[in-house]
Amino acid sequence: MKIDVHYAVSKKDQKVDLTPEGFKFAEQIVGKSLFDLKDPWAFYIVNALKAKELFAKVGACRRVGAFTKSPVPAQQVPFGQP
């Protein structure tokens, strides 16, 4: 999906809205209505777009050596580790 074609983002209000083209595109991908009561997809699609556009991306972190206080080479640090 493409921003400003399939959906609009309001960073100030922290919301994402699907455009009419976006609804048609998403329904083609899913293969049925996004608002089917037995299997609603609209909620999941909008939340995925919010996560992509509004929330910070987690990147590489740097560790500092305990004794040397100098940076250790950049690497991915798992959550919960200093």
Image (cartoon, helix red, strand yellow):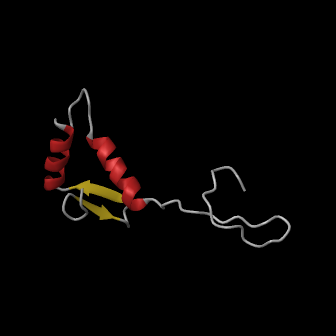
Relative side of 17 to 13, left or right: left
Relative side of 81 to 37, left or right: right
Q: Position of residue 41 (x, y in %)?
A: 27, 38
Work out whether residue 38 can be spotted: yes
Relative side of 21 to 4, left or right: left
Find the residue positioned furthest to the top: 38
Q: Quadrant of residue 8?
A: bottom left
Find the residue positioned furthest to the front: 73
Work out whether residue 34 can be spotted: no
Relative to 68, say whether 25 is above or below: above
Which of these two is toward me, 68 or 8? 68
Find the residue positioned furthest to the right: 67
The residue lying at 26 percent from left, 55 percent from top is 17
Find the residue positioned furthest to the bottom: 70
The residue lying at 48 percent from left, 61 percent from top is 56
Say which quadrant the C terminus sits in.
bottom right
Relative to 64, say whether 39 is above or below: above
Relative to 40, say whether 62 is above or below: below
Q: How many marks?
A: 0
Q: Quadrant of residue 74?
A: bottom right
Say which quadrant the N terminus sits in.
bottom left
Q: Position of residue 55 (x, y in %)?
A: 45, 59
Q: Position of residue 53 (x, y in %)?
A: 37, 60
The residue lying at 25 percent from left, 63 percent from top is 3
Q: Position of residue 33 (x, y in %)?
A: 16, 37
Relative side of 25 to 77, left or right: left
